[in-house]
Image (tube, helix red, strand yellow):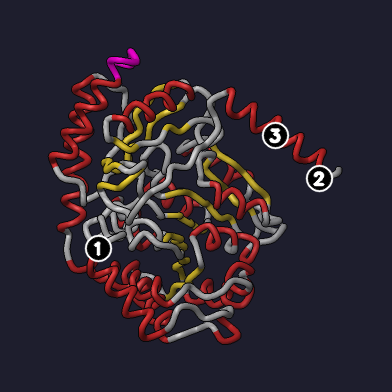
Amino acid sequence: MSDTTLRSLLKTQLEDLRSRGLYKRERLLQGPQGSAIRVGDREVINFCANNYLGLANHPAVVEAAHEGLRRYGYGLASVRFICGTQELHKQLESNIARFLGKDDAILYTSCFDANGGLFETLLDERDAILTDELNHASIIDGIRLCKAKRLRYRHSDMAELEQGLRDAQDSRTRLIATDGVFSMDGDMARLPEICDLANRYDAVVMVDDSHATGVLGEGGRGTPEHLGVLDKIDIITSTLGKALGGAAGGFTCASKEVVEFLRQRSRPYLFSNSVPPPIAMAAQKALELIAASRELRERLHANAKQLREGLEEAGFQLKPGQHPIIPVMLGEASLAGAMSDKLLALGIYVIGFSYPVVPQGQARIRIQLSAAHTAEQLEKAIRAFTQVGKELKVI
């Protein structure tokens, strides 16, 4: 295929995406991340970021990044096993492991890489992976790289998971892979039941807790702590790019044997540069803030309660849940796009999500709360949603 033919083919497909309301446009932010941001030369209230605790532009986190730059430099220009490991990386890994109650942790440049480097490293054709159908794309892609047998179960369907475990009893290792919080719906995995099944069928449990680390649980230790099974989860992957500072980076936290083997064989770890020192130091400060106090988590969940109750009272259909992800269900992709555009005109920054990010016919606006939002900002959002919802005959 020539370049001209390829470009023509892609142009047709792009035009098709636009005609069906599925084309994703990026809006330009004119300043730092926060509860209020500048877009199109005006200030709007931001309900799109994973900045759950408001730490993405927190003064202590920003100063820690500056200190990391001053003390350790901009980057390592190398991978970890050659000349890219500093004491800073080892300290952060040790503190993450201690925070989550595991033996050790290993840093990656993203949680996508952590998941991409997990399954093919630990498993082969003698093994089986049981995966929730709504797992994040990084889990799906990581599993695709692996030669293990794949058994996908319907979302949170424990009967189907158990049947898969029965079908995989001849496998050397059975690994159950699930998100802790499913990012498009804001619901949680049924971890207590998953752990019971894993115990009954001698399986390993892996949880990607990217949307819950720092957010859920009495101590901010995520979905496993919130649901009382932290000591029963074998492998936790998560991110530094959401509640833990919001920049970049990810990790896998597990037993010392798992982490040691990942250091030897995990390709995204072996062939990617080290996490930059400013990011590692800022993430360490974010972890300290999370471990020291429940204040930010309590404020976050109070904000979620206020907004959820206000939108339900206005008549919107929301996905139920306890997480600060609030999906406003609209159905049609074009409706979600139109609503987000009208809300932006009223100073509310949200994004419509549609297929293939969510299933066909389940287009929505996903609201994400932050501890940095004020009560006044939330009330303004409720008024704007109500106005636009009535204009578009959603409510």
Q: Which residue is mark 2?
A: 3
Q: Which residue is mark 1?
A: 58
* Residue segment shown in magenta: 389-395
The image shows residue 82, relative to residue 328, as above or below, that is below
Residue visible at 35% across and 75% down in the picture: 281
Q: Residue furthest top?
A: 393
Q: CA distance from mark 1 to mark 3?
A: 42 Å
Residue 216 appears in the picture as rendered: no
Residue farthest front in this picture:
41
Q: Position of residue 28 (x, y in %)?
A: 42, 46
Q: Which label lies toward us, 2 or 1?
A: 2
Residue at point 40%, 22% (across, down): 330
Of circles 1 and 3, the one toward us is 3
Tell me whether circle 2 and circle 1 mark residues in contact (CB < 8 Å). Answer: no
Toward the right, the furthest residue is: 1
- Identify which residue, 315 or 222, lies in the foreground: 315
Q: Is residue 168 above or below residue 118?
A: above
Q: Position of residue 219 (x, y in %)?
A: 23, 61
